[in-house]
Amino acid sequence: MNIKMLDLSEQYQSMRREVMAKLDDVMSSSQFILGDNVKQLEADIAKYSGVDHGVGVGNGSDAIHIALQAAGVEAGDEVITTAFTFFATGGAIARAGAVPVYVDIDPVTFNISPAKIKAAITKKTKAIIPVHLYGQMADMEAIKNLADEHRLAVIEDAAQAIGAKQNGHSVGELGTAATYSFFPTKNLGGYGDGGMIVTKDEELAEKARVIRVHGSKPKYYHHVLGYNSRLDEMQAAILNVKFPYLDKWSHARRERAAYYTDHLQEKLAGVIQTPVQKKGNYHVYHQYTLRVPERDQLQRYLKEQGIATMVYYPQPLHLQPVFKQLGYKEGDLPETEKAAKEAISLPMYPELKQFDQDYVIEKIVEFYANKEEEGFNQTKAEEVTQ
């Protein structure tokens, strides 16, 4: 068996003609930078997110950085976020000149804890970045209430959560802005890098548009320090082909997640923790992530059986060497650190076949059955020697 974490080949073949025709249109038009495809995608993703403005940028990391700058975050400001996320979140804060303030997570959802955010707010706090990890929104209503009380910006890092909802609200509706990544592995992915900021704030959107083109408006007149970070026209064209399929793909991911959960709970209840969708949430399962004992041994065993898995994320941001100067130490964020030792993500994509899922489930069950047998034999051996 050779079961990949993600296989994009079938998806591509299903829309190959559409994609190639769209790319030919771009080539024929010779409109390669911030053209009609970017404008269409910006409008469609903004509407999909329940807001008025979309600003296409070069990648998801730049989307966070530019959104922070457009929201007024400056050198010396503090930005509260989770340490259990990809480096781009903390890196964008630091690149904006601000100080990342890392707080602990809800152990059930892996998302940032509003209670921990509240305890970390100081006079220097300027913004909060909740990360909607693995495809499930953080507790945005509680976070918005805190932000409103303290007049803080909320930048939703939704790189993994396009299409997710909470009590009828889309990603981007409750925050000051939300950021997406269109990296190829994402639920809506291009064939290269890409990102977007969505917001209901017209002023923030306009600032972001200026920042993405070297801070110039009009051209050659520079009022702020910006960057060269524009969503590529060809990537936008590809994404315009793929976008109408997004809800169908989200539904397929949810079906496959339910299948994993039903069968793993039936056979390993009390041994592993399957993903929990909080009440009111619509989880889009960018990743299907378990909490398991003996995680590293399980991962090695599954690899031997031809099953790919991933660990997101083995070293939390507060313990990364690049943030050593912030003074965090092991034990500061116990739930985050525990999750980093227990989390493992299984193959998950809309085209994943049921017989492949059956094989993954079978081998996980087999691993823990073997461990139980080893434990039994070890106990019997100890009894004999006593």
Image: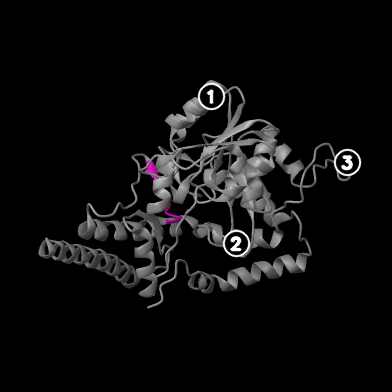
Q: Is residue 222 left or right of residue 333?
A: right
Give the mark, 1 or 2, whose residue is nearer the N terminus. 1
Instruction: State the image quarter where residue 153 is shown.
Output: top right
Q: Is residue 283 visible?
A: no
Question: Of 52 and 62, which appears nearest the observer?
Answer: 62
Extreme right residue here? Answer: 220
Q: State which region is magenta.
A: 281-287
* Residue at point 33%, 58% (across, down): 294
Q: Is residue 286 magenta?
A: yes
Residue carrying label 1: 148
Question: Of 46 and 267, which appears nearest the observer?
Answer: 267
Q: Residue 114, how many percent across, how many down? A: 44, 32
Q: Residue 317, how many percent across, how many down? A: 54, 46
Residue carrying label 3: 221
Residue carrying label 2: 190
* Residue at point 57%, 73% (across, down): 16
Rate crowding at label 3 as few (under 14), some (14 to 19) or many (20 or more) other CA atoms within 10 Å: few
Mark 1 touching mark 3, by CB under 8 A?
A: no
Magenta: main secondary structure equals loop
Q: Cα distance, mark 1 to mark 3?
A: 35 Å
Amino acid type shown at disc 2 = Gly
Amino acid type shown at disc 3 = Tyr
Q: How does the figure colour the protein chain or chains? A: one colour
- Circle 2 SS class: loop
Q: Is residue 48 left or right of residue 349?
A: right
